[in-house]
Image: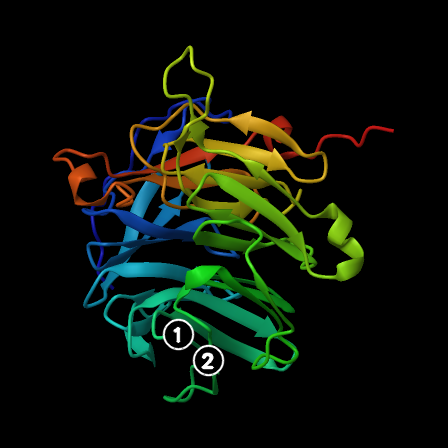
Amino acid sequence: MSFFGTSTSGTLATQPPPDKDIEVADPPTDSISSVAFSPTADYLAVGSWDNNVRIYEVGASGQTQGKAMYPHQGPVLSVCWTKDGTKILSGGADNAGRMFDVTTGQATQVAQHDAPIRIVRWIESPQGSVLATGSWDKTIKYWDLRTPNPVSTVNLPERCYTMDVVYPLMVVGTAERHIQVFNLQNPTTPFKTLTSPLKWQTRVVSCFPSANGFAVGSIEGRVAIQYVEEKDASNNFSFKCHRRDQTPSAKDQSLVYAVNDISFHPVHGTFSTCGSDGTINFWDKDARTRLKSFDPAPGPVPCSTFNRAGTIFAYAVSYDWSKGHSGMTPGHPNKLMLHACKDDEVKRKPQKR
């Protein structure tokens, strides 16, 4: 097991949840692409464009310690955990899916595509557990980690940009705004295919914890809330976010930024959005209201995640290439941050009678 930096970030001496977000010590050396908490403990897996996956332990008062690190042969684009918290899965621009065994410290290749693997998701079902990998080679492959070949392959209409799973629901977003909805009891055939309700390129899809719908975020500062069943279609809506006025007096919201990630709170079902404008918001979809706005970060926020109890919200501040090569300025911040969630930020608003 490769350990890195045994220092802990000693920014916190007092016990109650800190008001100020905590910066994680020894962050990756290049932009952060993906973050995921273990479902069984406060361990955070972090994928980066520096070709590595790092694992941090987060203490009760927010102090962090690097525990392990393993490499890909290209930028890491996605990380996730198995349900029992013993293994981390990752996919990258080396076209490979890799598995890291937390108990032994061994990393092995477990998946292969013909193009970069954009997203990895672990599927826990009554029939057994598989790894789903979505790639720019226009396929999703399902892998039983005990065998070297995929269990099955699903052809997509375009390159896979995003995917999420809350069993039995799986939602896949591709190039050209295609969205495919799967019932994982029949994992090889889409239950439903639709065009994104948003007019611009899909950046992220995220399933409701209740598995009856999903949120879509686009590059044009918008989020759509979509229910799977037609009977719930009247609850579908979309809203603008991650926009700014050209000048303080203009109030025109004409500066439009990508919605990079959407994370649902595991307990309350509220959700976060983070964007290329460096802002983060918490939302209640049922009350259709914003619960919290963070102070703007010093750079884009590419990814985020809640821990299993919903008490810690982790997010990255990294260049996300939203302005192309010209935006990659020397000294651009590259940080991993932890926010202690307060109840009133993440709890649903009472329904108005």
* Residue 315 seen from this side: yes
The total number of labels drawn is 2
Left or right: where 21 falls relative to 191: left
Would you say the residues marked 1 and 2 are in contact, meaning their CB atoms lie under 8 Å apart?
yes
Packing grade of label 1 (10 A; few <14, some 14-19, many >=20) is some
Question: Which residue is nearer to you in this view: 209 or 114?
Answer: 114
| Label 1 – label 2 distance at C-alpha | 6 Å
**Is label 2 in a helix, a strand or a loop?**
strand
Q: Can you say which quadrant of the picture contains the N terminus?
A: bottom left
Residue 265 in percent (x, y) is at: 59, 44
Residue at image position (41%, 38%) is 275
**Is label 1 in a helix, a strand or a loop?**
loop
Task: Give, as a three-letter code, the residue at label 2.
Answer: Asn
Task: Give, as a three-letter code, the residue at label 1.
Answer: Lys
Left or right: where 199 falls relative to 300: right
Residue 74 in percent (x, y) is at: 20, 64
Q: Which mark is residue 155?
A: 2
Q: How is the image coloured?
A: rainbow
Q: Earlier in the sequence, mark 1 or mark 2?
A: 1
Residue denoted by label 1: 138
Question: Which residue is nearer to you in this view: 318 or 146?
Answer: 318
Question: Which residue is nearer to you in this view: 201 or 94?
Answer: 201
Whether 259 is drawn above or below 170: the answer is above
Residue 35 in percent (x, y) is at: 39, 51
Q: Can you say which quadrant of the picture contains the C terminus?
A: top right
Residue at image position (50%, 47%) is 217
Residue 339 in percent (x, y) is at: 45, 33
Which quarter of the figure has residue 45?
A: bottom left
Whether 29 is drawn above or below 15: the answer is below
Left or right: where 147 falls relative to 264: left
Q: Which mark is residue 187?
A: none
Packing grade of label 2 (10 A; few <14, some 14-19, many >=20) is few
